Image (tube, grey):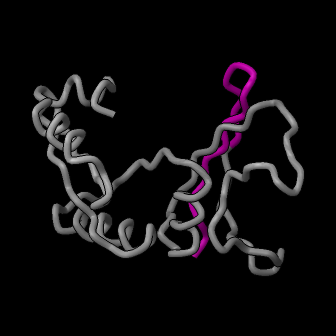
Amino acid sequence: RSDSQLVQTARETPVLVAISPQASSAEQMRLEGAGCEVFVCRGATPADRLRELLEELGRRRLTNLLIEGGGQVFGTLLDMRAIDEVHAFIAPKLLGGAAAPSPIAGQGIGQVAEAVSLEQPAVQQIGDDVYVRARVRR
């Protein structure tokens, strides 16, 4: 969003915003006018666009990327096997049900035997939340 703190500081610290071709041209112009670099991902599907963005970041020699997203983004990355490390904050709340949102969407993994394993998870309490960090076992 063009009113975010990142956008407001784009002239001091470089900000790359990835958008789809369906994004509003007015919003793209606002972002560019604020000093952001806008990268249009033209892939046909969200996964194609995400792959295109990761390839572009690789061309720019960016080797570390923090992704803060929702279940669809994380599910797509998991389906692509593009997650190396996990940092998760877990609130002390129970939520669930067949129609409840999930932290990981996408195709998913339905069998425990096929689950992605995490190596040496570190667990820490921060306020009321539990913070878990670990690398993905390959």
Question: At x 68% / y 51%, what residue is drawn?
Answer: 103
Is 126 a magenta residue? yes
**Vertically, is 72 above or below 101?**
below
Tell me if 134 is positioned left or right of 29 in this view: right
Picture quadrant where residue 131 is located = top right
Question: Furthest residue to the top?
Answer: 127
Question: At x 34% / y 54%, what residue is drawn?
Answer: 64
Tell me if 46 is positioned left or right of 75 in this view: left
Q: Position of residue 83 (x, y in %)?
A: 51, 64
Tell me if 38 is positioned left or right of 125 in this view: left
Q: Say which of 22 and 34 sits in front.
A: 22
Q: Say which of 12 and 117 sits in front.
A: 12
Is 129 a magenta residue? yes
Q: Position of residue 77 (x, y in %)?
A: 51, 66
Q: Say which of 42 and 87 sits in front.
A: 42
Question: At x 52% / y 58%, what residue is drawn?
Answer: 73
Picture quadrant where residue 105 is located = bottom right
Magenta residues (range): 123-138
Q: Position of residue 126 (x, y in %)?
A: 67, 24
The quarter of the image holding the N terminus is: top left
**Vertically, is 12 above or below 18?**
above
Question: At x 30% / y 51%, what residue is drawn?
Answer: 23
Question: Total marks drawn?
Answer: 0
Q: Main secondary structure of the magenta part?
A: strand
Picture quadrant where residue 130 is located = top right
Q: Position of residue 12 (x, y in %)?
A: 12, 26
The quarter of the image holding the C terminus is: bottom right
Q: Say which of 11 and 128 sits in front.
A: 11
